[in-house]
Image (cartoon, rainbow, N blue to C red):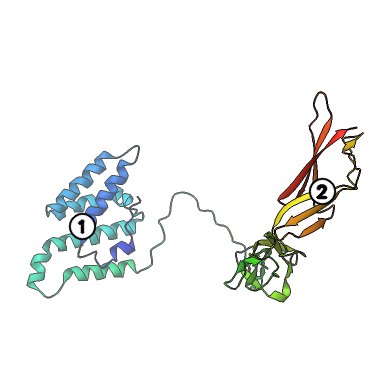
């Protein structure tokens, strides 16, 4: 810690009343600080310890020679001669008055300790004299004229930069839909985020929503995208089946009569005449277009036979068949 005795310490209202305790605390602090140094001054530590014992035993006058020394003043952070002399004087006076306070206060209504405190206030409220001149030559320079900055500098007129948009939702927002329901924008709140951490709400008319064209037709998750100028943010909503919603149960493929499950080129099997159907829980069927299902070819050839296992998949359902080398 750094121990410094300054105007704030000496002007403290408790200074005159608790001077003994204040001095002991500072002396202990000085001892601790000195012990932390690599080249600790143990003579100074012993003197501080003796001074503490003197104060504790009521011999405050024995402390005056110690606290009046120049090196002791330096330890306390008091550097100038004027402050050193003044500090030693007021401490000596206050110590003597504290020692005699029990007798003086009982003999008169005039509180001498308070008077000493007033003198301290008067002294430290005066302006401090300039530091004593040193033997080093003083070099003087002329400072350049100070130009008053305009009140419209960059720091006061800097424009915030937009960085992103964020989407929040109120209690009105619908995050789950049943199959067949249309998307509702109610409860969506869009904010523009700035580089200084601030944000600004964007009105509904100023941003756009991109909703899938087949939204809500089947169970699963749908992605909705919010766009404002060059910024985008997306979120998902869930589509649920109802008891009345037909569920996909299977898928099958058909071929024209006489179709041969053989091919001269197993890497390029011709499936142009294949038709694929989806079957639902209400026994309805739907013929699928080629872009609605996927076809996977897997080579299952053996040493004696060349063949490819073909799998047709639509969502969660699939069917398979084998095509042999012709």
For label 2, the residue is: 253
> Which residue is painted at 18% across and 59% down in the image?
95
Numbered badge on residue 97: none
Alpha carbon of mark 1 to alpha carbon of mark 2: how far?
100 Å
- The answer to whether any part of residue 318 appears in the image is yes
93 horizontally vs 189: left or right: left
Mark closest to the chain's N terminus, 1 or 2: 1
Residue 294 position, x and y percent, is: 80, 48
> Which residue is painted at 26% across and 53% down in the image?
26
Which of the two residues, 269 or 285, is positioned nearer the viewer here?
Answer: 285
Q: Secondary structure at mark 1?
A: helix
Q: Secondary structure at mark 2?
A: strand
135 horizontally vs 291: left or right: left
Which of the two residues, 212 or 16, is positioned nearer the viewer here?
Answer: 212
Numbered badge on residue 21: 1
- Residue 309, above or below 156: above
- Residue 11, above or below 67: below
Q: Residue furthest top?
A: 303
């Amino acid at each position: 810690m750094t121990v410094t005795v300054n105007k704030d310490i000496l002007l403290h209202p408790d200074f005159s009343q608790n001077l003994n305790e204040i001095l002991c605390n500072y002396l202990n602090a000085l001892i601790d600080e000195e012990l932390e140094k690599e080249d600790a001054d143990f003579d100074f530590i012993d003197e501080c310890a003796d001074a503490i014992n003197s104060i504790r035993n009521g011999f405050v006058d024995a402390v005056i020679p110690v606290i009046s020394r120049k090196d002791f003043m330096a330890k306390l952070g008091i550097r100038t001669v004027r402050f050193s002399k003044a500090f030693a004087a007021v401490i000596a006076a206050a110590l003597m008055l504290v020692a005699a306070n029990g007798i003086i206060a009982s003999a008169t209504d005039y509180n001498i300790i308070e008077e000493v405190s007033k003198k301290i206030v008067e002294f430290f409220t005066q302006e401090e004299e300039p530091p004593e001149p040193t033997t080093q030559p003083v070099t003087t320079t002329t400072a350049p004229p100070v130009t008053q900055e305009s009140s419209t500098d960059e720091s006061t007129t800097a424009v915030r930069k937009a960085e992103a948009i964020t989407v929040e939702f109120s209690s009105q927002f619908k995050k789950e839909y049943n199959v067949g329901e249309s998307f509702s924008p109610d409860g969506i709140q869009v904010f523009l985020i700035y580089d200084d951490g601030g944000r600004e709400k964007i009105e509904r008319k100023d941003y756009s929503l991109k909703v899938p064209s087949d939204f809500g037709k089947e169970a699963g998750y749908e992605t909705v995208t919010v766009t404002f100028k060059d910024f985008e943010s997306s979120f998902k909503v869930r589509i649920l089946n109802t008891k009345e919603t037909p569920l996909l149960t299977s898928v099958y493929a058909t071929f024209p009569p006489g179709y041969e499950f053989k091919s001269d080129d197993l890497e390029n099997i011709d499936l142009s005449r294949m038709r694929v159907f989806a079957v639902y829980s209400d026994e309805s069927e739907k013929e699928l277009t080629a872009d609605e299902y996927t076809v996977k070819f897997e080579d299952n050839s053996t040493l004696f036979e060349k063949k490819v296992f073909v799998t047709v998949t639509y969502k969660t359902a699939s069917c398979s068949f084998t095509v042999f080398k012709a």
